[in-house]
Image (tube, rainbow, N blue to C red):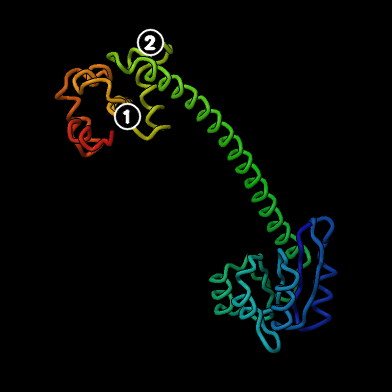
Amino acid sequence: MYRVVVIEDEEAIRKGIIMSIDFSALNCILIGEASNGVEGIKLIQEKKPDIVITDVTMPLMSGIEMIEQTLEYNYTSIIISGYDEFSYAKKAIKLGVCDYLMKPIDKEELNNVIQSIVSGFDLSSKISGLLKEKNQIEHIQLLETLNKEDHLVDKITEYINLHYSEKIFLSDIADVLNYSESLLSKRFRRVTQMTFNEYLNRFRIQKSIEYMKKGTYGLTEISDICGFSDYKYFSTVFKKYTGYTPSQFTNMIVW
């Protein structure tokens, strides 16, 4: 139920307003009342209402000032006044007041205004629920997509691990996995944050370093074993990723 407070300095009018509202039909409940703006601030801070019905002119602090000082509590306000003054209405509009009603209060008009507010609350709640549900569905779909993409990327990296010494093209892997080359390229980049060729070169360079540390093969042989078409290209790629030529790197290794 939506929580309502009524703030009016004249007790008879305040009680009349309360008696005029069909709380149960409007899915509302009265949670408090106050006789001036100062009491109203305290009431709003303590009760955190959804709807505030307040007079404009009151002792100690006006309804307008009270609203100004409690905007952070995010309630919807209805202003009532015995004066049809444009300055009040203008200020109320700036403060986001929902409606401005003149005294004497018409019971049907007041209930219609509250009904309109409640309908807005219900709609907002429904939209929020739908958006939350939509976000949850999209999150699940994203996880499913990423899991599927991870599975494909695992297949690609597994293929590289087994065939890095050969000539490898993404089109070959696409044929093996029965996916389009374009799709695999996009998914691989999304998951690894690098292109297929960049990953392949990094993997081959890492393998070449492992062979260098073993000291079993010469640099030209390592270049060939790791799948590079020629030593010059191997040297260029090696320096790109390590900052050293293969021979410089070999000399740095402590045997």
Q: Where does the image place residue 155, in percent across and percent down from the top left?
A: 45, 19
The residue mark sitting in front, 1 or 2, is 1
Q: Which residue is mark 2?
A: 175
Distance of label 1 from label 2 (alpha carbons): 26 Å
Q: Where does the image place residue 196, in percent across and percent down from the top left?
A: 33, 25
Question: Disc 1, disc 2: CB below 8 Å?
Answer: no
**Residue type for callout 1:** Gln
Q: Which residue is mark 1?
A: 206
Out of 117 and 89, give the one closest to the viewer: 117
Q: Where does the image place residue 22, in percent across and percent down from the top left?
A: 83, 61
Q: Quadrant of the N terminus?
A: bottom right
**Residue type for callout 2:** Asp
10 Å neighbourhood of mark 2: few (<14), some, or many (≥20)?
A: few
The residue located at (18%, 20%) in the rendering is 220
Disc 2 secondary structure class: helix
Q: Quadrant of the C terminus?
A: top left
Disc 1 secondary structure class: helix
The outermost residue toward the bottom is 60
Out of 26 and 4, give the one closest to the viewer: 4
The residue located at (70%, 85%) in the rendering is 58
Residue 47, by quadrant, is: bottom right
Residue 180, by quadrant, is: top left
Out of 247 and 74, give the one closest to the viewer: 247
